[in-house]
Image (cartoon, rainbow, N blue to C red):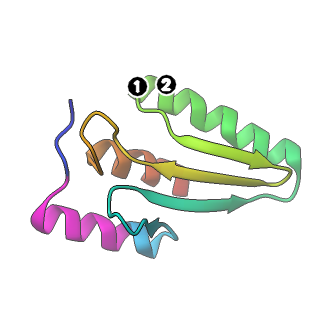
Amino acid sequence: MSKLLEGTDRTEALEELSEAGWTVEESGNAVTRQFKFKTFPEALGWMVHMGVIAEKMNHHPEWSNVYNRVDVRLTTHDAGGLTSLDLELARKMSQ
C-alpha cells in the first residue's frame, strides 16, 4: 500500500498538480481535472491509452466521459487520500 503524501512532499505535489490544471477537492483527499478533446474518438482513445497505463500501475482512476470531455478524479482509496501513485498517474495524464 502507498503512503499518504504529507508535509513538504504533499505541498510540492499539490503545487505541481495545480500548475498542471488539477484541482484539489475540498476534503483534500483527491484531485480532479477535466480533459477536453476535439472529438469523441480522441477522448475515447486517450481513455484507452491511460487505462493501459493505469492497469500497469495497478492504480485506477475514477472517470467519466461525455462526448469530447473526460472528467478524472484521483485518490488512493486504500490509503485514504493522495499518494505518490496519484501524483504519478496525474503526471502521465497531463503529458
Q: Quadrant of the C terminus?
A: bottom right
Residue 17 in the magenta stretch? The answer is no
Q: Residue at x 33, y 56 (%)?
A: 29
**Amino acid identity at mark 1:** Asn
Residue 18 percent coordinates (x, y): 42, 73
| Residue 58 shows in this picture | yes
56 vs 63: above or below: above
Disc 2 marks which residue? 55
Residue 15 in the magenta stretch? The answer is yes
Q: Residue at x 53, y 57 (%)?
A: 94
Q: Nearer the viewer, residue 59 or 80?
A: 80
**Amino acid identity at mark 2:** Glu
Q: Nearer the viewer, residue 92 or 31?
A: 31
Give the magenta part as a residue range: 5-16
Task: Tell whether label 2 touches label 1 (CB within 8 Å).
Answer: yes
Q: Based on the displayed image, in which of its 4 quarters is residue 36 positioned?
A: bottom right
Indicate left or right for 93 with 1 as reference: right
